Image: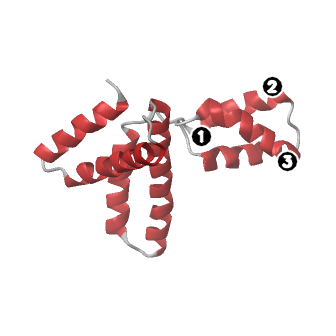
């Protein structure tokens, strides 16, 4: 089943079950998909849907940081639930150790040795981990390995 169909089925189920958090989260994803389809007058691919979900996940992570600063535990809990729902539609996320292994392999492949190579490293690593981890995590690990 395609990701878009799965989103639609889950939306219907969440409406029947009166699961408002799931319904609202899926509605946001579907709205982002529709926005691209309307703006660019084309179908959105599976990879693009995964990118949309990843982007929303990243936005939620940033929002949690703000909620922590504002001491809003209710919003942190809600956002964590929304993130769990979004993660259901992405491939299994990589652990930091798995990302570290990929970074080490890439360093060996391209012969990176200093911070000057960080752009090349990021360009090489990101396609390998696409949709399975956050770019900030990759950046942090690459910087640690190159210093």
Between 26 and 96, which is closer to the camera in this rendering?
A: 26
The Cα–Cα distance between marks 2 and 1, rounded to whole angstroms, is 20 Å
Q: Earlier in the sequence, mark 2 or mark 1?
A: 1
Residue lying at the far front in this picture: please name it. 41
Q: Quadrant of residue 8?
A: top left
Q: Position of residue 77 (x, y in %)?
A: 33, 60
Tell me the number on the disc at residue 115: 3
Disc marking residue 33: none
* Left/right of residue 28 with respect to residue 116 in the rendered view: left
The CA span between labels 3 and 2 is 16 Å
Q: Position of residue 80 (x, y in %)?
A: 37, 54
Q: Is residue 55 above or below residue 2?
A: below
SS of the residue under disc 1: helix
Check disc 1 and report the residue beneath it: 96
Q: Would you say 63 lies left or right of 73 here?
A: right
Upstream in the sequence, badge 1 or badge 3?
1
- Name the element at disc 3: helix
According to the image, label 2 marks what residue? Answer: 109
Q: Is residue 76 above or below residue 87?
A: below
Q: Name the mark nearer the viewer: 2 or 1.
A: 2
The residue drawn where x is 31% and y is 67% is 74
Q: Quadrant of residue 1?
A: top left
> Can the viewer see residue 70?
yes
Contact, mark 2 vs mark 1 (Cβ under 8 Å): no
**Pointer 1: residues within 10 angstroms few (<14), some, or many (20+)?**
few
Tell me: residue 102, above or below residue 67. Answer: above
Residue at 30% of width from left, 46% of height from top? 26
| Residue 65 image offset from top left, x and y in percent | 50, 65
Q: CA distance from mark 1 to mark 3?
A: 20 Å
Q: Nearer the viewer, residue 73 or 138?
A: 138
């Amino acid at each position: 089943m395609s990701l878009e169909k799965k989103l639609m089925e889950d939306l219907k189920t969440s409406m029947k079950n009166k699961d408002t958090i799931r319904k609202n989260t899926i509605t946001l994803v579907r709205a982002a998909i529709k926005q691209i389809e309307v703006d660019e007058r084309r179908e959105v691919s599976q990879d693009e849907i995964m990118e949309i979900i990843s982007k929303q996940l990243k936005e939620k992570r940033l929002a949690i940081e703000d909620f922590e600063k504002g001491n809003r535990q209710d919003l942190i809990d809600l956002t964590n639930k929304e993130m769990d729902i979004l993660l259901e539609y992405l491939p299994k996320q990589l652990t930091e150790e798995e990302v570290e292994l990929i970074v080490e392999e890439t360093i060996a492949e391209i012969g990176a040795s200093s911070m000057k190579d960080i752009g090349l490293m990021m360009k090489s690593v990101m396609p390998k981990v696409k949709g399975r981890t956050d770019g900030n995590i990759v950046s942090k690990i690459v910087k640690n390995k190159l210093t």
